[in-house]
Image (cartoon, rainbow, N blue to C red):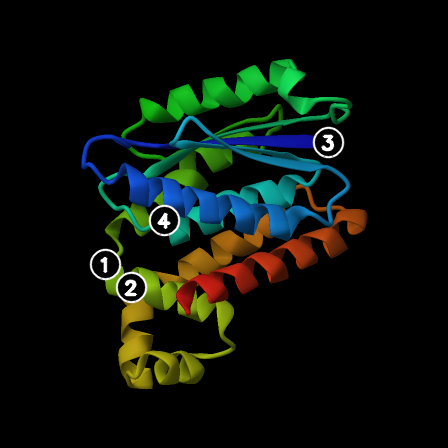
Amino acid sequence: MLAIMVMDVSNSTKYENGKDIRLFLEQLTTYTEKSTQHLSFSYTDFRMGDELFFVCNDVNATLLLSYYIKLLWPFKNQPVKFGIAIGDIDWPTGNIEHWNDPLIKHARNALTAVKHSDISHFHMHFESDVTPLFNDIVFPYITEITEAHTEVQQSLLLYDLVYPNQKVVAEKINKTTSTVSAQLKRAHKRQLKLIEQQLKLFLKHDEASDDLEVFDKQFKAAIKEWLL
């Protein structure tokens, strides 16, 4: 099984902050490569100044990666959008830049579809009964929640993601625990936690669980590094 994620930055040239976007995407590329190097197959490529191309043999890691990127993304007026395609195919051999498979086209078509959506920043191509549930409910809900976050709420969610409890988070940002708790409630932390769990369970197999746990731990370590 392979999963492809093509991520695109909306309005990437509109605000004359192309350098900031490029630097963030370069850092994101490094985080992704470090977090997925343990997988049997993974490839990450930062392309054309505003696109991230990712493919690997762990479907759950791909979905979770797109979710974490959405939580991390700092440019509110230039949201990232994701085209995702999943297929039961062998991973490529040789130069991946010469790889040409229908799954790539499906991922790009999914990205095109989401660019024309006014309710979701994610679209997935996958021949499964669960696909409409994600495209029509889960992904639009992630989009609605994250787009409504204030800068403070976004930051607190990231701290909460990588530290063990709200008391530690409060100490890290020099706020009271009650303030942190109230802001996380407004940020819909509980709902996002349930979504995260569903992304981890999507097509989960016993043989993939250890790989997913390693990815999750390593990418959260990268988020912690980014917060420092």
Give percent across and percent down for residue 121.
37, 35
First in sequence: mark 3 vs mark 1 = 3
In the image, which disc is placed on residue 150?
1
User: How far apart are the alpha carbons under marks 2 and 3?
Assistant: 36 Å
Q: Provide the secondary structure element on which disc 3 rests.
A: loop
Give percent across and percent down for residue 61.
62, 46
First in sequence: mark 2 vs mark 4 = 4
First in sequence: mark 4 vs mark 1 = 4
User: How far apart are the alpha carbons under marks 1 and 2?
Assistant: 5 Å
User: How far apart are the alpha carbons under marks 3 and 4?
Assistant: 28 Å
Q: Are marks 1 and 2 in contact (CB under 8 Å)?
A: yes
Residue at the disc numbered 4 = 73
Residue at the disc numbered 2 = 153
Q: Provide the secondary structure element on which disc 1 rests.
A: loop
Q: Is residue 187 visible?
A: no
Quadrant of the image for the N terminus?
top right
Amino acid under label 2?
A: Gln
Q: Provide the secondary structure element on which disc 4 rests.
A: loop
The answer to which of 30 and 168 lies nearer the viewer is 30
Q: Is residue 210 left or right of residue 189?
A: right
Q: Quadrant of residue 186?
A: bottom left
Residue at the disc numbered 3 = 1
Above or below, comparing residue 126 to residue 175 in the picture: above
Amino acid under label 4?
A: Trp
